[in-house]
Image (tube, rainbow, N blue to C red):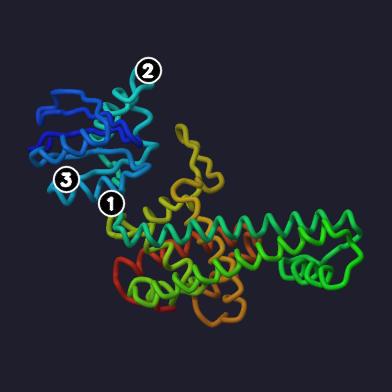
């Protein structure tokens, strides 16, 4: 039990529910405060143990409380839900956060720095821009098919075709005007994506962790910055297997008695990071075909033959997750055997 009082906080945009617990585990008070009163209340508190759900604005408040001298613990949301008792309301949610914080083997979420959140912001903006650009190209492909214009697969092919249609076409002025606007939109989105890619490259060049990660086959500046901004300190994971499990790349187990069945991957943890690791695995598979001399390349080629391409790629992603943990914790570059 902590020697300090514990304050469990259910965060929101403008109204905050607080549950103050003594170091003997007894509830002292329950408060519902607006943003201004919440800041004033916390500014005048003696050193306390602050527990919150890792959710919207939790990292901002985590940094705010740490600067004030408090101990901050962020709990993954999925570990809080089972402890909600009675009806779903803010008071019961705050109590559930406190109960979850007492459980053994809970892996708390480290409070992210502003720099880490800056990098994550770039990744989220890039992901949205790429999705919007792809949606625009798919829409153009579908609309122009109704006018008898069919294009090869790929974004470059559709954009090249649209530019040619605009230059010499008998289509109506209304459609041509919309096509021109779509090309302007595409160029703007592409320019923003390129600028974000340059920013991520600059961040990776200045970060020793990212530089070491980029020595791993299949890992570039984009994926390296995503890993460093999401994971932070890899030491919070006991071993490489724990880290791979956190990414959701380990098999799902269903066991009862003496019977145990292994299924597909659990898909727990950060979905975006898992997607990037699978993309990196596809690049690594192509690398292994050319570099068949190393043990890693031989292992990859053997598992692709034995398990097939799709399952093999997931297995390689799992392997990459373990390698990444080793590189981050040992603070040394990747050394292929």
- Dot 2 lies on which element? loop
- Dot 1 lies on which element? loop
Residue designated by label 2? 87
> x and y percent of residue 19 in the render?
21, 27
Q: CA distance from mark 1 to mark 3?
A: 11 Å
Residue designated by label 3? 71
Give the quadrant of residue 26.
top left
Q: Residue at x 66, y 61 (%)?
A: 308
192 with respect to 22 (left or right): right
> x and y percent of residue 180 in the render?
75, 64
133 with respect to 85 (left or right): right
Mark 3 burial class by Cα count in 10 Å: few <14, some 14-19, many 20+: some
Q: CA distance from mark 2 to mark 3?
A: 29 Å
Mark 2 burial class by Cα count in 10 Å: few <14, some 14-19, many 20+: few
Residue toward you, 80 or 48? 48
Whether residue 175 is situated above or below residue 40 in the rendered picture = below
Q: Residue at x 77, y 72 (%)?
A: 160
Whether residue 335 is situated above or below residue 161 in the rendered picture = below
Give the quadrant of residue 216.
bottom left
Residue 111's mark? 1
Mark 1 burial class by Cα count in 10 Å: few <14, some 14-19, many 20+: some
69 with respect to 146 (left or right): left
Which is nearer the N-term, disc 1 or disc 3?
A: 3
Mark 2 touching mark 3, by CB under 8 A? no
> x and y percent of residue 142 in the render?
81, 54
Mark 1 touching mark 2, by CB under 8 A? no
Residue toward you, 288 or 156? 156
Q: Residue at x 48, y 74 (%)?
A: 198
Count of marks placed on residues:
3
């Amino acid at each position: 039990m902590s020697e300090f009082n514990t304050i469990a906080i259910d965060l929101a945009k403008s109204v905050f529910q607080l549950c103050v617990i003594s170091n003997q585990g007894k509830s002292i008070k329950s408060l519902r405060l607006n943003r201004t009163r919440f800041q004033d209340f916390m500014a005048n508190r003696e050193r306390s143990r602050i527990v919150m759900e890792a959710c919207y604005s939790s990292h901002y408040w985590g940094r705010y409380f740490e600067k004030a001298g408090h101990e901050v613990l962020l709990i993954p949301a999925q570990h809080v839900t089972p402890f909600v008792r009675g009806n779903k309301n803010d008071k019961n949610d705050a109590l559930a956060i406190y109960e979850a914080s007492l459980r053994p083997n809970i892996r708390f979420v480290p409070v992210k720095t502003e720099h880490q959140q800056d990098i994550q912001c770039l990744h989220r903006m890039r992901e949205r821009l790429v999705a919007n650009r792809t949606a625009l190209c798919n829409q153009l492909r579908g609309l122009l098919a109704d006018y008898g214009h069919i294009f090869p697969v790929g974004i470059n092919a559709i954009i090249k075709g649209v530019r040619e249609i605009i230059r010499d076409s008998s289509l109506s002025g209304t459609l041509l005007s919309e096509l021109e606007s779509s090309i302007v939109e595409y160029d703007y989105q592409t320019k923003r994506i390129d600028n974000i890619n340059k920013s991520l490259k600059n961040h990776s060049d200045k970060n020793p962790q990212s530089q070491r990660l980029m020595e791993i086959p299949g890992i570039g500046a984009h994926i390296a910055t995503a890993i460093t901004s999401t994971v932070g300190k890899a030491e919070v994971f006991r071993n490489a297997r724990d880290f791979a499990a956190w990414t959701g790349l380990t098999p799902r187990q269903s066991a009862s008695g003496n019977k145990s069945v292994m299924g597909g991957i659990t898909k727990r943890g950060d979905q975006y990071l898992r997607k990037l690791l699978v993309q990196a695995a596809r690049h690594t598979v192509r690398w292994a075909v050319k570099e068949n001399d190393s043990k890693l390349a031989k292992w990859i080629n053997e598992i692709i033959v034995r398990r097939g391409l799709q399952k093999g790629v997931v297995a390689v992603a799992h392997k990459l997750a373990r390698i990444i943990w080793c590189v981050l914790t040992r603070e040394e570059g990747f050394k292929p055997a």
